[in-house]
Image (tube, rainbow, N blue to C red):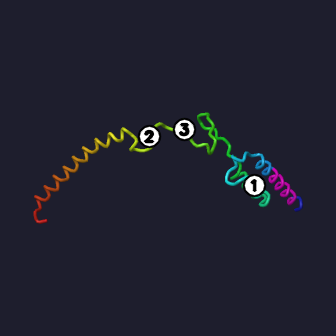
């Protein structure tokens, strides 16, 4: 039983040391969720949970290799050169504004047809 406990202590100590080295060697701007000093305290005070939390939630995210061969770093967003050139809002789109003029004629025809039908219904049913 003592051997098992000593094995757990050694694993915990190794995880603690590895997490501390990883935390202290990471760039401050790449550390996620909390500042570096908070991660150091969490790793030291809540062993081994703090070290596991560092590897899950605090360690800098690794670049992802996409299927087209490029790499994407999480958190880098979309650079301006990769964004589409489409207008952001419909009222900035000239094609949309042109279509509104075409729809206006259609709307007027529908209103005229509706008025004609209402007049026909009034003529058929004078009691109401």
Q: Main secondary structure of the magenta part?
A: helix
**Above/below status of 89 relative to 127:** above
Secondary structure at numbered mark 3: helix
Q: Position of residue 65 (x, y in %)?
A: 64, 38
Circle on res. 87: 2
Instruction: Name the image quarter holding residue 42.
Output: bottom right
Circle on res. 37: 1
Q: Earlier in the sequence, mark 2 or mark 1?
A: 1
Q: Determine contact: label 1, label 3, CB under 8 Å.
A: no
Q: Residue furthest bottom?
A: 127
Q: Position of residue 45 (x, y in %)?
A: 79, 60
Q: Quick check: is 7 in the magenta stretch? A: yes
Residue segment shown in magenta: 4-17
- 102 left or right, relative to 54: left
Q: Earlier in the sequence, mark 3 or mark 2?
A: 3
Graded by Cα atoms within 10 Å as few (under 14), some (14 to 19) or many (20 or more), the crowding at tag 2 reads few
Q: Quick check: is 3 in the magenta stretch? A: no
- 92 left or right, relative to 112: right
- 104 left or right, relative to 24: left
**Above/below status of 71 relative to 110:** above
Residue at x 72% of width, y 47% of height: 28
Q: Residue furthest top?
A: 69
Instruction: Name the image quarter holding residue 79.
Output: top right
Which residue is under mark 3? 80
């Amino acid at each position: 039983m003592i051997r098992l406990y000593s094995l757990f202590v050694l694993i915990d100590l190794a995880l603690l040391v590895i997490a501390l080295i990883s935390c202290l060697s990471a760039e401050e701007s790449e550390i996620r969720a909390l500042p570096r000093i908070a991660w150091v305290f969490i790793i030291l005070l809540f062993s081994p949970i703090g070290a596991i939390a560092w590897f899950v939630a605090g360690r800098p995210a690794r670049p992802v290799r996409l299927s087209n061969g490029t790499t994407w770093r999480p958190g880098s967003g979309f650079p301006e050169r990769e964004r589409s050139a489409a207008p952001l809002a419909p009222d900035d789109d000239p094609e949309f504004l042109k279509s509104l003029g075409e729809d206006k004629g259609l709307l007027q025809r529908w209103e005229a047809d509706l008025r004609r039908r209402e007049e026909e219904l009034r003529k058929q049913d004078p009691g109401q």
